[in-house]
Image (cartoon, grey):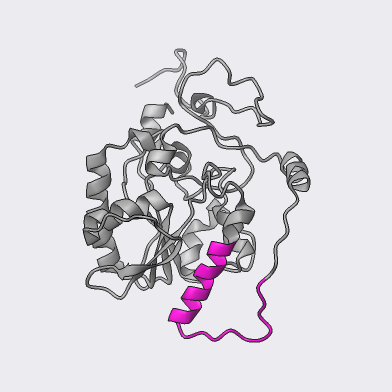
Amino acid sequence: MSVEEVMARKLPDVITHNLDMLIIGINPGLLSAYKGRHYPNPGNHFWKCLFLSGLTNEQLNHMHDQTLPEHYGIGFTNMVERTTPGSKDLSNKEIREGGHQLLEKLQTYRPLIAVFNGKCIYEIFCKEIFGVKAKNLEFGLQPYKVPETETVCYLMPSSSPRCAQFPRAQDKVHFYIKLKELRDQLKGVTKTQEIQETNYSFDLNLAKEDAKRMAIKEEQNDPGYEETCAHGSWGEPQQAFGVHPSTNTDQVMDDRWTMQPFAEQIPDIRCSNNTRTS
């Protein structure tokens, strides 16, 4: 399977009516489209933060994405359906039109909370739908509801490790905890005395050792991420990949793991020249 063939794939939404929250990314990346799963990239913090915050009661990964609506009231969608190697490959027109398509989904399925996974995604939606150019956005609950619904908007940092402001999963857990509290508040769930927010500590050296032990590899750099907030993912430890040719793919730089190009990740299942065809 070539890169072009993977780009022709679409990543299906995981969505149903009356979800507690709908997680919104920008568009599918190559690994997401290839696997047909949401947030499968090994360096992404999404699934880890979901567990650490108590939004799930066990550590899940991308292979569980289809089960989340039933078990946890969580669904997945993207602003733009088209698969690209990087977010920079999307046109401004696509992103703007995607905002209106997202509005139609939200009005149809009416989740309790529309969760924007990354500031840039919400900025575009805010401008296109509310006619407001967002400035000095704060993470958390936003002042606008989705038109013609009771769906509130919640902004959290991108779960990608390339998020410069919050580069570690540890830095983002707080926003997932607050998201859980917002969900419980909207559903009228009272917090019992037995439930206590965990104080998380972080040791960089221990984290590096854990990363080496678990063979966690970081995602390859996407130059267009800062412009459009790439849609990244986290799941079972595996190699990340990219599609841009490079002569340095075998070099380990800045304590990062060696990353293999995308084309080398896909098994060659095409028939050989010696195979008879009909």
Residue 126 image point, x, y percent: 29, 57
In the image: residue 226, left or right of residue 201: left
Task: Identify the residue at horizontal 54%, vertical 29% (top origin).
Answer: 265
In the image: residue 153, left or right of residue 210: left
Q: Please tell me in which quadrant of the rendered image residue 214 appears.
A: top right
The quarter of the picture where the C terminus appears is top left
- The verdict on residue 175 being magenta is yes
In the orientation shown, which residue stands out farthest toward the front?
136
Residue 47 image point, x, y percent: 57, 55
Task: Identify the residue at horizontal 73%, vertical 46% (top origin).
Answer: 204
Give above or below for 69 relative to 219.
below
Residue 124 image point, x, y percent: 30, 51
Q: How many marks?
A: 0
Task: Identify the residue at horizontal 78%, vertical 47% (top origin).
Answer: 206
Residue 154 image point, x, y percent: 41, 65
Task: Identify the residue at horizontal 36%, vertical 73% (top origin).
Answer: 18
Whether residue 78 appears in this view of the structure is no
Q: Nearer the viewer, residue 83 or 268?
A: 83
Q: Please tell me in which quadrant of the rendered image residue 127 appears.
A: bottom left
Give above or below for 260 relative to 194.
above
The quarter of the picture where the N terminus appears is top left
Question: Over which residues does the magenta segment extend?
Answer: 174-197
- The verdict on residue 140 being magenta is no
In the image: residue 224, left or right of residue 126: right
Whether residue 129 appears in this view of the structure is yes
Q: Nearer the viewer, residue 151 or 277?
A: 151
Give above or below for 140 relative to 264.
below
